[in-house]
Amino acid sequence: MAEQPRRLPRWPFIIIALLGVQMIGVLTMMRIAGDDPAFGVEPDYYEKAVKWDSTAAARASADQLGWSIDATLGPVISAGNERELRVTLRDRHGAALNAAAVRAEVFCHARSASRQEAVLTPLTPGEYAARIVAPRAGLYEVRLDIVCNGSRAEVARTIEIAEKAAAR
């Protein structure tokens, strides 16, 4: 009687196939998430976490200094969906803060990967402005870095824009 060839068991191939299907699914989901324009990652997240104490102190310094900081995003003023970011700075007595260096980082919460940075220029005493592209209605995060009279403060404001920019 001839000896029959030995057959390999099937179950290892089933496990390998299931792991392969799972890997393809995970890679597909990563690709979908990476291509989503609403997906965003905080830049330099680790560095900011390491320096959290100094960041928290800079954010609290505006209150300690008694500064009043108001930020607004105006209506669309150009064909490129630009709006004016206007920041008003006052001291604890209501006097305008002059000669301040104001930088801003602005992004829509719905598209946090698309961030804009701007250096604001003085308009009138205590008022600073820059043009920001903001084509959609929604919540915008405005992060300000302010240096005035040797003092520094970081503040964040959330501004809601109700009207959508006109399609051109």
Image (cartoon, rainbow, N blue to C red):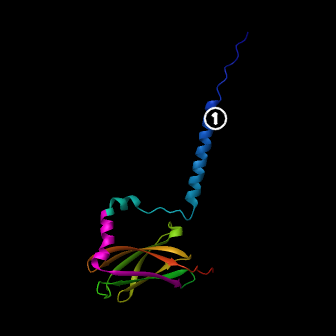
In the image, residue 64 lies in the stretch drawn in magenta: yes
Residue at point 60% right, 51% down?
A: 28
Tag 1 residue: 14
- Which quadrant holds residue 38? bottom right
Q: Quadrant of the C terminus?
A: bottom right
Amino acid carrying mark 1 in the image: Ile
Q: Residue at x 60, y 44 (%)?
A: 22
Residue visible at 33% across and 62% down in the picture: 52
Q: Is residue 116 above or below residue 53?
A: below
Q: Is residue 11 left or right of residue 107?
A: right
Expressed as whole percent of the image width and height from the top left, the position of residue 123 reads 40, 88
Rendering quarter of residue 9: top right
Name the residue at the bottom extreme.
124
x and y percentages locating residue 105 in the rendered image = 43, 73
Which span is picked out in magenta? 53-76
Q: Residues within 10 Å of mark 1 (few under 14, many from 20)?
A: few
Left or right: 29 in relation to 51: right
Query: Which residue: 45% across, 82% down?
Result: 72
Vertical comparison of 22 with 97: above or below: above
Query: Which residue ends up furthest to the right in the rendered image?
Result: 1
Is residue 67 a member of the stretch shown in magenta? yes
